[in-house]
Image (spheres, rainbow, N blue to C red):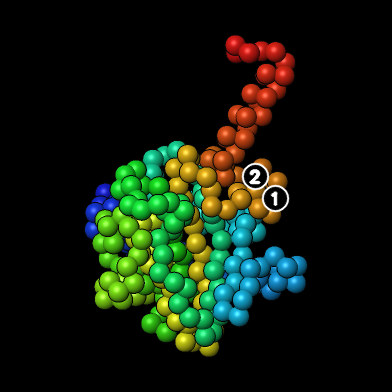
Amino acid sequence: MKDVANLVDEIIAGKGYVLIPEVLNPTQAQEARSLVLQLAEKEKLQGKVLLDEQRERVYGLVYKGEIFELMVQHPMVIAVIEAILGKDMTLGGFSAHILNPGATKMGVHVDYPYWTMKPPFPPYPVMEIQLIWMVEDFTQENGAPVFAPGSQKLCSPPDLVQFSKIGQKVTGKAGSVVISHGLCWHDTSVNSSVQPRVSILGNYAPKYVRPLENPLHDMQQEVLDRASPKLKQLLGYEFKSALYKDVKRIRAGNWND
C-alpha cells in the first residue's frame, strides 16, 4: 500500500479518491455481503429498509455484526481519514447500499454535508470523507461507482455535461475500499448483471458536523460494552459520557468542578 501521505495528497489535491485493493480478505468480504442481504430480507418484513424496485438501504450496521465493527474502524483506513480530518473525527453514517439487477444510475452528487450547503463550497477544512467498501467484485457490469477525477477542487455542485466527459468507473476486487473526498462528484452506474450488488458506505466527518445518520440507530448495548476506544469515539460515546457526568455534577450543585 502507498504511504498515508501519498494517499492523502491524492484525495485532496489529486483525483479526489483512491482505491486500496483487498483490505478485507475474501472470507471477510463474503461474510459482510451475505449478512447485509440477510439483514435486508429481515428488515423488509419489519418495514425498516428504504426500498424501491432498484435500491435498498440497511442502516445501523455497526450494531449488526462484528465484521462491521472491524470495518468501520479498520486501522488502514482510519489512518488515512485521521490524516485529513484529524484524530477527533466522528462517524457520520455506516450503512449498506444494495443495487438490485436493473438498477439505473443514482444521480451525480457530492456527499453530505456539502449537498445541504449553498455553493461555492469551502475548500478547507474538509468536512467529509466517504468510504465505499466493495464486499464483492465491482465490475463494468454490476453498478460500480463513477468518479470525476479532480472535481473536488472545483468546490461546486456537479456539472452533468462535464461529468459525462470525465467520469471514470472504479472497479475492484472484493475486499477493496474506495476513500473519497466529499466534494468529488460521483454516481453509481447501471447494474446490468443478474445479481444484487452490495456496497457498504462509511461517512466520516469532523465532530462539529451533525451526523448524517443517527449513531444510535438500532443500538445494541453489548456492542458499546465491548467497543474499543476508537469505536466509542466514532459513535460519539465519549461526548455522551461527558455530558452525562456534567448533568450529574450540575444537579449536585458542583458548578466549579
The label shown at residue 57 is: none
Disc 2 crowd, CA 10 A, few/some/many (<14, 14-19, 20+): some
Quadrant where the image shows the C terminus: top right
Q: Residue at x 66, y 29 (%)?
A: 244
Dot 1 amino acid type:
Gln
Report x, y in % for residue 125.
Answer: 34, 43
Which quadrant would residue 245 be assigned to in this image?
top right
In this picture, is 80 found above or below 107? above
Q: Residue at x 57, y 45 (%)?
A: 235
Horizontally, is 217 left or right of 88 in the view?
right
Q: From mark 1 to mark 2, how far is it between C-alphas?
A: 7 Å
Report x, y in % for residue 250.
Answer: 68, 18
Q: Residue at x 64, y 23 (%)?
A: 246
Q: Residue at x 45, y 81 (%)?
A: 190
SS assignment at label 2: helix
Q: Are marks 1 and 2 in contact (CB under 8 Å)?
A: yes
The answer to whether residue 172 of the structure is visible from this angle is no
In this picture, is 220 found above or below 38? above
Which quadrant would residue 56 be assigned to in this image?
bottom right
Dot 2 amino acid type:
Leu
In this picture, is 78 found above or below 52? above
Residue behind mark 2: 224
Report x, y in % for residue 196.
Answer: 55, 80
Residue behind mark 1: 220
Quadrant where the image shows the N terminus: bottom left
